Image: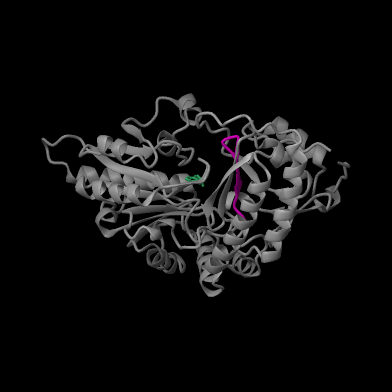
Amino acid sequence: MTKRNNSGSGRQSLARIRADEAHFLMNTYRRPPIVFTHGQGCRLYDSQGRAYLDFLGGIAVNALGHAHPRLVRVIRREAGRAIHLSNLFHNSYQAPLARKLAAWSGLDRVFLTNSGTEAIEGALKLARAYAHGKERGSSAPKTRILALENSFHGRTFGAVSITYPAKYREPFAPLVPGVEFVRLNDIADLEKKFDGSACAFVVETIQGEGGIYPVTQDFWDRARSLATQNDAALIADEIQCGLGRTGRRFAYQKFGSLPDVVAVAKPLAGGLPLGALVANERFAAAFFPGLHGTTFGGGPLICAAALEFLTVIEEQGLMGNVRARGAQLCKGLEELAARFDFIQEIRGEGLMVGVDLTVDGTPIVEEALRRGLLINCTHDHIIRLLPPFIVRSRDVDEFLEKFENVLAKVSKNCRSTRKPGPIEMKTQEPALMAATR
Ligand SMILES: *Cc1c(COP(=O)(O)O)cnc(C)c1O
């Protein structure tokens, strides 16, 4: 790529940015040599003016795409009023946002956070506080937390302690004690581990980083009844799959019973950092003033943006678009699966789709990037697609055409002999490796 210095407009050259990042940023992400400067709808543009079709959406965050006029308007307006007031005072937007989240989820009360991982922390603390409130002097401690194998819940200590892949947890030992992992959709394993000593069972309704694996109806039903029987919290992590991604407000709404607590975040404020836990009254009552809190969570600007995000989804019927575009995408991908034998399965719901490969997905992600397509690979061999809810029919067609070309190009080098080994997550981040020319 040419090295153009845009410093006149306050922008630095790609080379300078890469050199400074390598020098001054902690070494936590590997990035391709591209600087994105702006976007519009499902498209992103880099500092060279190249356009990319964005089927990753900032990892399920940019559900209204980029520069959505209604979000831009609200953020501009509120930036000129009050960005932050602290949770010591009322603001105009927390209550209407909480009311809407309660209505969407079927649950009762909301606590607003800055991120997904903070929402998980809040949910775990709520479950522990509830359980301690139930303990009588002599009763056995009720502190165990159950989570699923292949899970991802975040990077802070509580959340990482219930995240399954050892590579996320072990470098930071000792972790929060009392965590036990249950095999996904294995009811016998769940029954063996779920007893009165558990205060919570945390489930991603559809595992995201884990590679788009949904919880089955039977497993959910058993989890619901065991949680009730043991007076433990059934906590749904819908940080990735919730808020319309599946074409429903929450992925769990297909099951016919509710969790006690749900965690949301990624798309909630249209790209601004906001998360929430929503709980039923029984569990929510375990929090009282002073027991839990946050400085940034739920500021006026960000809550106004979240309220606008949810309102746009409702008013524009975007969940209908999610279902229609998701069906169109999966149909096209199934056709590709019939042609390319290294595609072994298409999984997903709505606009949360995994393309499970028998080969390494990294070259596919790299080739896609070279062709102006942003996608992601998780677990080394599962291409993950998380396009914005506003994606149009012709965007999906364009994606399928480009993706087909990508597959045709890399298929020459693919040997479809390798079956994926035991699940071992590679990286939570987009596998956007060096896109050399
Ligand atoms: C992204 C994610 C998280 C963590 O959210 P952060 O905002 O990155 O802390 C937790 N759970 C799931 C299912 C996620 O996809």
Q: Nearer the viewer, residue 246 or 162?
A: 246
Q: Find out whether residue 382 is within the magenta segment.
A: yes
The reply to whether residue 115 is in sight is yes
Q: Is residue 161 left or right of residue 422?
A: left
Q: Position of residue 116 (x, y in %)?
A: 48, 48
Q: Point out the stretch of residues depicted in magenta.
A: 378-387
**Residue 341 at x, y percent in the picture:** 65, 40
Determine if residue 40 is in view. no
Query: Foreground residue, 2 or 209?
Result: 209
Lateral position of residue 271 relative to residue 93, left or right: right
Q: Quadrant of residue 125?
A: top left
Residue at screen point 35% across, 39% down: 186
Quadrant of the frame with the C terminus:
top right
Specify the farthest residue to the bottom.
Answer: 315
* Residue at x-position 38% and y-position 36%: 183
Determine the residue positioned at 77% across, 41% down: 409
Classify residue 199 as left or right of residue 95. left
Q: Looking at the picture, does residue 36 appear above or below residue 269?
A: above
| Residue ID at (16%, 41%) | 135
